[in-house]
Image: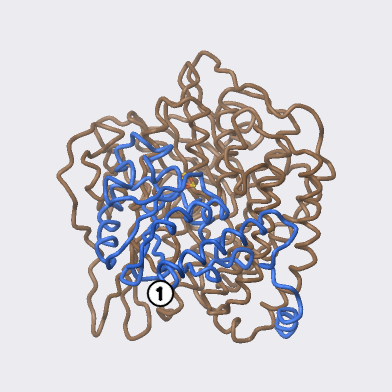
Chain colours: A brown, B blue
Amino acid sequence: MSEIAQELTVTAAAFRSGAMPVTKVTRKLWQQAAGDLSRGLITLLSLWADHKAVYMALLNEDTKHIGVLRLDIRRDDFPSVSQFHAPAGRLERAISDLFGIRPDGADDTRPWLDHGRWQISHPLGATEPAEGPVVYEFLPIEGESLHQVAVGPVHAGIIEPGHFRITVQGETVVRLEVRLGYTHKGTDSLMVGAAPERGAMLAARTSGDSTVAYGWAFAQAVEAALGTEVPERAIWLRALMAELERLANHLGDIGGICNDAAFGMMLAQCSVLRERVLRASMQSFGHRLMRDIIIPGGVARDLDDEGHRALLALVASIRAAFPSIVALYDRTASLLDRTVSTGVLKPALARRFGAGGYVGRASGRDFDSRRDIPYAPYDRLTFEVPKRDEGDVDARIWIRIREVEQSLSIIMQILHQLPGGPIHTPAVPVGQPRQGLGLVEGFRGDILIWVALDAKGRVARCHMRDPSWFQWPLLEAVIEGNIIADFPLCNKSFNCSYSGHDL
Amino acid sequence: MRKFLIDGLTRRPLTEPKPDPVDAAIEELGQKIHNHLYRRLGRSLSIRLVDAGSCNGCELEINALSNPFYDLERFGLRFVASPRHADVLMVTGPITRNMAEALRRTFDAMPEPKWVVAIGDCARDGGCFAGSYAIVGGLDAIVPVDLHIPGCPPNPTELLQGLLPLLESVEAG
Ligand code: SF4
């Protein structure tokens, strides 16, 4: 048992109902934590900075306790975590881009979010005029008969922008290097000084497909910081929306992945179901993506009888149609030929990166924050967390299929048990600075949001960590040795967020 | 698989007008779009989409236009992979500085005549993200804009409705 693991004492119940305690550490202890991470004794939940300190959120996977370590910055650097633990690498590069604080000892010091086009550098730290666009140095490639394919940032389809540098030997991918940051909107800087209501709007626009999950995680963080007691009904409605969001995304993904294996019928069938979810969401919550419905203190809109009926009908229609779609997938040999044993993510790597969502659960990482770091109302709902060990595209599809079934069940449970009462209570400032942590299971995995409020209750710092931060590097790993034609398939099976990552 | 094929032959398609007001409206809009296109251009319209830093919400709804409920192509609108095949450039997002050059280059690669449509609140003036160091703030700072369709995100019906004025103004090229 490591010393650091023992420092992680905060239970889910504790940080979900009150301000998040922070443990101040020395450089030595900080380094020790990095060492423990590299030995797999603890899991990195996130790494971020403000203008005075760097922070590390950690999880002890055995006890499910968490902790936030804080290291004050003395000069303008901190001991690099990534030199021991690779998953921290891009988070560190983002810190140095935004704050000008250097990870001392890091192997990779290339800029990440900053493409030299912002006109300023270190927008959240000691800001200086920028020198102009930089030429990004991709990792050097040496070897016989290698060939590079560069894709993006403008892609052929209707998807988000990013750049993929694929090195192939014949048809086989030797290395994929991803370059991101194209959708960087400077959300962190807009958060500074924002009232919680505006903060919630920004959070809800971090990744459009996870707008409910982000809204919820942000609200959780603010409510925990202020000790706000959210009305029961609001909590249940939040979960209802979160499951509808999961349902819509998983249905879209199942179809989308199969479409990338050139099997369009699955896409057509699944997109019909997805559209039904969006229409039912519109009927019950007034917005197809249910954006801005979750607000700090509760929800902005109640569910009426018509909405209730629309959701019952939705569940019935999906339950009627989904099994034959699953059977279609399972019985089409030419499709399975593409998905089985393609893009294998090894369990050890998934664990090391703390991969959340279907990426982790398809590779043996039995973790779901709804169950393991529980929050209401999931502690009163019955559901299973599916897990597979194969780690291939097929397994990532099956996890989604099982989660669709679980979400349908959860939605029914909520509709049957939905308590009455008010749906909002004001989140009142407490007259002193406070900090809170939100952790919500989005469809992609656990979303972490850290919010520090000033004495007036405005946001002093907000850090949002999308699950994609730990999934993008894994995509690079799994594609190795696959044929280049399978890249879209692998990519879609991960379906990482660009905007959620670039912020 | 056989079941789906047989169902496909025997069941009424989802795109048929239904009591659902959304579907009825789509059908009507689509016919209008179709009529305009063939009167003015004599062919279908090719659209190239560029995400210039959107939250992905706008893309989700633009993608929904291709699902069997809306089935955009039947009205003569289609999304193409290359800007060289496109008549219309659709742009989403608050135009991040990191995407500005790629966007400009995509526009330059399109043949004349061409039109630009800004999708969503962000693309007008940065929307929620206005004032950030990381965005240009408004599509018209980079390329000339012919039309703006508001919403966060605009839903499929609003997208089709929003496109009509553009088609009304399109002259045969
Ligand atoms: S307009 Fe709304 S949905 Fe569209 S990119 Fe902007 S925030 Fe996202």
Where residue A454 sits, quadrant-wise, is top left
Label 1 neighbour load within 10 Å: few <14, some 14-19, many 20+: many
Q: Position of residue A240 (x, y in %)?
A: 71, 45
Instruction: Tell me if A276 is positioned left or right of B52 in this view.
Output: right
| Of the pair A235 and A146, the residue shown nearer to us | A235
Which amino acid lies under the numbered mark 1 shown in the image of this protein? Glu
Instruction: Tell me if B74 is positioned left or right of A380 in this view.
Output: left
Name the outermost residue toward the right: A416
Where residue A480 sits, quadrant-wise, is bottom left
Can the viewer see residue A213 in this picture? yes
Element on which disc 1 rests: loop
Q: Position of residue A384 (x, y in %)?
A: 74, 56
Identity of the residue drawn at 30% across and 46% down: B140
On-image quarter of the C terminus of chain A: top left
| Of the pair A264 and A11, the residue shown nearer to us | A264
The number of numbered badges drawn on the structure is 1
User: What residue did someone put label 1 on?
Assistant: A480
Identity of the residue drawn at 50% across and 43% down: A58
Can the viewer see residue A39 in this picture? no
Identity of the residue drawn at 24% across and 62% down: B108
| Of the pair A121 and A99, the residue shown nearer to us | A121
Name the outermost residue toward the top: A431
Identity of the residue drawn at 49% across and 51% down: B162
